[in-house]
Image (cartoon, grey):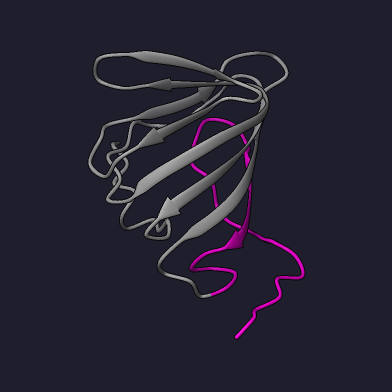
Amino acid sequence: MAKFIQKPMIVRAAGNKPKIIEEYIGRVNSGSTTISVARMVSPGGWEEPPQSPRFSEYTLVLRGLLRVETQTEVFEVRGGQAIIFEPGERVRYSTPAPEGAEYIAICLPAFSHETVRREG
């Protein structure tokens, strides 16, 4: 059965500055536990603690620069680029450029504050 999503729900964000997370599909807005789809808008200078999520994450940057740090590499993901992480990988996200970033995050299974496993 089809489920029409009229608008996203705002989900609490971690980090040193306010970040907007608009969940379209997921535990909060649609009750979906198998997948979450959210639009993120992060200001310049935003950063969050490292995490080792129990879900796969597929991130598509729409505009700006998303810096993604792993234990061994740092990726500068720009508008029109994407990055994928498998469950258990340690990752830290930030938006160091003044214009911040806008991106779409898809998580399988759906994101939850319990399964993101943030440090600190």
**Figure quadrant of residue 96:** top right
* Residue 50 x/y as whole percent: 33, 31
User: What residue lies at 32% left-to-right and 13% top-to-bottom?
Assistant: 73
**Figure quadrant of residue 83:** top left
User: What residue lies at 40% left-to-right and 66% top-to-bottom?
Assistant: 34
* Residue 9 x/y as whole percent: 66, 62
- Identify the residue at the far right of this view: 6
**Magenta span main SS:** loop
Q: Is 45 placed above or below 12 here?
A: above
Q: Quadrant of the N terminus?
A: bottom right
Q: Is 44 placed above or below 104 here?
A: above
Q: Nearer the viewer, residue 101 or 109?
A: 109
**Figure quadrant of residue 63:** top right
* Residue 32 x/y as whole percent: 48, 71
* Residue 27 x/y as whole percent: 48, 68
Specify the segment rendered in magenta.
1-30
Q: Is 55 left or right of 45, judged from the image as shown? A: left
User: What residue lies at 34% left-to-right and 30% top-to-bottom?
Assistant: 91
